[in-house]
Amino acid sequence: MIPSATIYNPQSAKTLIDEVIERSNQNIYACYQCRRCASGCTVGEETGITPDVLIRLIITGNREEALDNALVWQCVSCYTCGTRCPNNIQSGRVTETLKKMSREEDVIPLNPNIAYFHDAFVQGCTRWGRVNEMEFMGYYELKNIGKHLVNFQFKKAYDEIVLQVRLGASMFKQKRLHLKLHTSRGRKEVKQFYKMALKKKATLKNDKKSGIGFRLD
Amino acid sequence: MEVAYYPGCSLHQSSQFYDLQTRRIFSELGVTLTEIDDWSCCGATSAGKFNDFLAVALPARNLGIAEQSGFKEMLIPCSGCYSSHLMSQTRLRSNKSLMDEINGELAFKVNNHLKLVNILELFLEAKDKGQFDSRIVKQLKGLKPACYYGCMTRFAYDVPVSDNVENPQGMETLLTMTGAEPRDWSYKTACCGASAAINDPDTAFNLMGKILKNAVKTGCNCIVTTCPMCQLNLDAYQEKFCNKAGIYERLPVYFITELIGISMGIPLSEMNADRHFIDVFGLVKELELV
Ligand code: SF4
Ligand code: SF4
């Protein structure tokens, strides 16, 4: 489904545009809807909605649709859109910003797996200082399979387990799995950065709730 | 010549053989790679989706370590790691207060003068300096690689890159030097889907299907890449996405180091090339390159 981008709400547009521009560092006002980004977008065919439409949604103040659509979640951060844009707008940075905003505003991710995946990765790498592929995949799969179980989708959970066990087995056979724990001695610093990031996230969320708007730092 | 070296998590795990090959070949070319001490994960693309501060702070730690160890230049073979370090550097350059905040937590502070290079840049530099002269002992005749760059080495956050953005030529230049005949094809900078292979497989398999289809159509007999993520994806899932896309051919997915290695007379077995999912020995044997 391609969301409508025709309704213009000047008030919500201003706050939405300001926030996106400030946080993504991209001047989306410069977009003149030429759609070069759209023709190059890696996932455009899958999502139906392309970066130009997303920018239009923001400019017209359609907050809900801008925060809750397939492109925000399925964008693979390839930045092809940015290299092609005549106005140097990196739409990939815009989708990354919207992803964060949508979670701050408790929008349920259209594709929760993608959200789990990135969370598991960040937690894994900040716990040990380095990512342990096995460990972080384990966490991700637990969450993913757990989600199916909670929803009583036993067949889905089963399929996922079979798929992952097969992949794991072939990785093991090709000697591409490593069981040793990889760590960095300086992980205290990394953990500290993680704590600071969590705090910044919480502040952003609280400010929004109490109507102050957003504040970066 | 001594260059700092950041392997990153995947070169210490699922793509360990790429690490081995990189060290071996550069050492034969007379370039010493010194792994920086106690590096940490760069956060890959996940950190940027979690929090902006974290995405800049994680790579910054490694930049600080390399700089304080006295290096001027750092090689990052993994495209994802390369891109996130470049992004961090650029952000720090334009935001003094962010840099101060991050430096406040770091034992090895960043002052942002490190030059980051990817593996192609370092190879091309070696070529220009003549370090390959008389090292190429085997002409890779009959090898028709599809040079696959993927997206991460070129789209690093408004940072100018050394190669052409739409039609990079670095790999072609190197492989032509080894006697291979790289083909012109359309998907060299397309994205393989990266982590979507795990968290959104339908999308990723479609993307990879298109890449392989075009490589086959243009008459390539193998794919070459520099990125461990691209390599793993196109290799480990090839059976799956080809079946899905109705492609009968299977192409070996080499790292650039493997082809350069063969041309320098290093046996594939010494480069741990048995770690591939799609066999890489058959083609080079058939062409009598090994
Ligand atoms: S390429 Fe740039 S200017 Fe054109 S529609 Fe996309 S974002 Fe707008
Ligand atoms: S970065 Fe995202 S929006 Fe831009 S081309 Fe890639 S997938 Fe599409």
Image (tube, coloured by chain):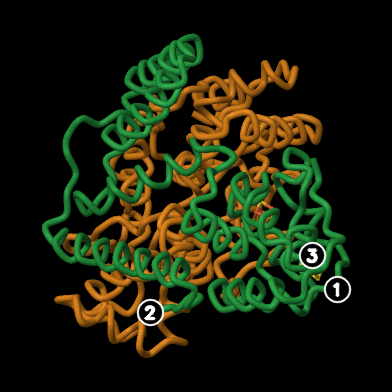
Chain colours: A green, B orange
Label 3: element kind? helix
To which chain does the residue with label 2 belong? A
Asked if one can make out residue B185 in the rendered structure from this viewpoint, the answer is: no
Q: Quadrant of the N terminus of chain B?
A: bottom left
Position of B43 compared to A69: left or right? left
Are there few (<14), some (14-19), or many (20+) residues within 10 Å of tag 1?
Answer: few
Circles 3 and 2 on the same chain = yes
Position of B90 compared to B151: left or right? left
**Residue type for callout 2:** Asp
Label 1: element kind? loop
Circles 1 and 2 on the same chain = yes
Q: Quadrant of residue A51?
A: bottom right
Circles 3 and 1 on the same chain = yes
* Residue shown at the point (19%, 76%) measured from the top left: B105
Q: Is mark 2 within 8 Å of ligand 2?
A: no
> Upstream in the sequence, badge 3 or badge 1?
1
Residue where numbered disc 2 is placed: A217
**Residue type for callout 1:** Tyr
Q: Is residue B146 above or below residue B269?
A: below
Are there few (<14), some (14-19), or many (20+) residues within 10 Å of tag 3?
Answer: many
* C-alpha gap between disc 3 and disc 2: 28 Å
Position of A78 compared to A112: left or right? right
> Upstream in the sequence, badge 3 or badge 2?
3
* Disc number placed over residue A56 in the picture, else none: 3
* Disc number placed over residue A32 in the picture, else none: 1
**Residue type for callout 3:** Arg
> Upstream in the sequence, badge 1 or badge 2?
1
* Disc number placed over residue B191 in the picture, else none: none
Q: Is residue B232 above or below residue B9?
A: above
* Residue shown at the point (58%, 74%) measured from the top left: A19
* C-alpha gap between disc 3 and disc 1: 10 Å
